[in-house]
Amino acid sequence: MTLKEVVERLGLRVFTSQGVGDVVVTGGYTCDLLSDVMGNAVAGNLWITMQTHQNVLAVAKLKDLAGIILVCGREPDQDVLRKADDEDVLMLGTDESAFRISGRLFALLEKS
């Protein structure tokens, strides 16, 4: 399933200025521990986290993730957004909990 389809079907907010394209989402990874994400997430995953600082951008770029979903209504500050745009890292958001959006993403990807 493409990133654009996932964003539309889950009703995610797009924080960064780059467009949501036809990148294929390979799965999801839910974790707030950066070292765990570095060790276990795979390219094309959407990373679900509550972390909003710049270090998440480096991890997402390193692992070639499809994007980052911020949960519980969290939003990145302007410095993080500028860096995300510079690094071409897509930042998304939802008011839902990590548990709920993880389940919804799983169900959506299982159907495709």
Image: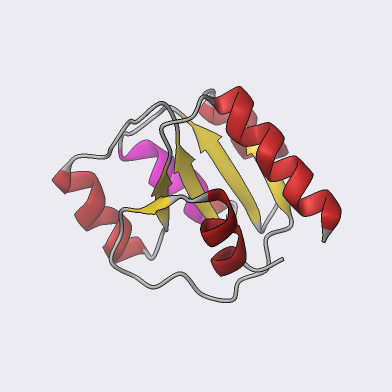
- Seen from the viewer's position, the closer of residues 12 and 86 is 12
Q: Is residue 47 visible?
A: yes
Residue name at image x 55 percent, y 36 percent: 48
Decide: is 49 above or below 93. above
Q: Quadrant of the C terminus?
A: bottom right
Residue 44: x and y in percent read 66, 58
Q: What percent of the width, then of the height, locates residue 63?
A: 59, 52
Q: x and y percent of residue 46 in the render?
A: 60, 49
The one of 76 and 2 positioned closer to us in this rendering = 2
Residues shaded magenta: 54-61
Q: Using residue 55 as the reference point, say whether residue 28 is left or right of it.
A: right
Task: Say whether residue 25 is magenta.
Answer: no
Q: Is residue 41 above or below residue 50?
A: below
Please name the predominant secondary structure of the magenta segment in the image: helix
Residue at 41% over, 58% down:
89
Q: Residue furthest bottom?
A: 22
How many badges with numbers are in the image?
Answer: 0
In the picture provided, is 13 more to the left or to the right than 41?
Answer: left
Q: Is residue 35 above or below residue 44?
A: above
Say which residue appears at 48% left-offset and 43% top-offset.
Answer: 69
Left or right: where 44 falls relative to 86: right
Q: Quadrant of residue 1?
A: bottom right
* Colouring mode (rainbow / by chain / secondary structure / one colour): secondary structure
Residue 55 in magenta? Answer: yes
- Residue 31 seen in the current view: no
**Is 93 displayed left or right of 108 in the figure?**
left
